[in-house]
Amino acid sequence: MSRAAERTVLQAVSMAGFLVCIAVAVWGWHTGVLTSQERLQALVSSLGLAGTLLFVAFQAVQVVVPVLPGGLGCLVGVILFGPVWGFIYNYVGICLGSLMAFGVARNCGKPLLSLLFSERTIQKYSHWAEERNRFARLFALAIFLPVAPDDFLCYLAGTTDMSWRRYTAIILLGKPFAIALYSLGLTVIWQHIVPVLG
């Protein structure tokens, strides 16, 4: 399969995922699930362990195949499971996805970057990888503070000589702050939006 065909397939998968998310959002709006936190939590509770596993899997997959902003998933986790368990499930899912992205990039190399991400993003951050002595520090800072596209940087790290051990340590230690920041900020915004929607 040519690179153009591979890029088309990946774009189609991303678009399909995006359309599914829109369809779920429309369904949730019409049924009142998305305008009532109680109804949303009741729906997830009715799924039991399957609901939790599906959410963690979604958080992992959305890192590997970027469909929606990761911050949106963090908000959903807090809304569905509360601040403590929502944070934990977000953390587990995003860390698993980050490790998978690194592994995929380690096996596929740099050509994969142009299939998944825009040239603008690649050009903006790829020079980090050329600074071997500074890349780990730049990467750790970007993961700790939500100031750069984490998904892309995870893939980019996989194309460098960074070890699995160092990468895993940065992800496990750096993600909690960014996830907590996203979760807190978006939860405050959500609490102001829901009364308007209702």
Image: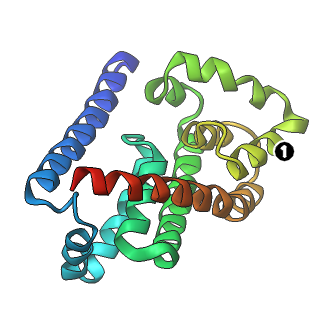
> Relative to 123, does residue 11 appear above or below in the rendering?
below
Q: Nearer the viewer, residue 172 or 195?
A: 195
Q: How is the image coloured?
A: rainbow
Residue drawn at the location 69% of the way across and 25% of the way down: 126
- Across and down, in percent, residue 88 comes to 52, 73
Residue drawn at the location 36% of the way across and 58% of the way down: 58
Position of the C terminus by quadrant: bottom left
The picture quadrant where one finds residue 10 is top left
Q: Nearer the viewer, residue 198 or 85?
A: 198
Number of residues whose C-alpha sits closer than 10 Å to that of mark 1, classed few (under 14), some (14–19) or many (20 or more): few
The picture quadrant where one finds residue 5 is top left
Give left or right: position of 164 versus 89.
right
Position of the N terminus by quadrant: top left
Residue furthest front as drawn: 196
Q: Can residue 77 be seen from the camera position used here?
A: yes
Residue drawn at the location 18% of the way across and 81% of the way down: 46
Dot 1 falls on a residue whose secondary structure is helix
Residue drawn at the location 40% of the way across and 19% of the way down: 3
Give left or right: position of 13 versus 128.
left
Instruction: Look at mark 1 in the image and give the residue it sits on.
Output: 137
- Across and down, in percent, residue 187 comes to 46, 59
Query: How many numbered badges does the structure rendering display?
Result: 1
Q: Amino acid at mark 1?
A: Arg
- Across and down, in percent, residue 38 comes to 25, 74
Q: Can residue 59 be seen from the camera position used here?
A: no
The picture quadrant where one finds residue 142 is top right
Give left or right: position of 21 versus 83.
left
Residue furthest right as drawn: 133
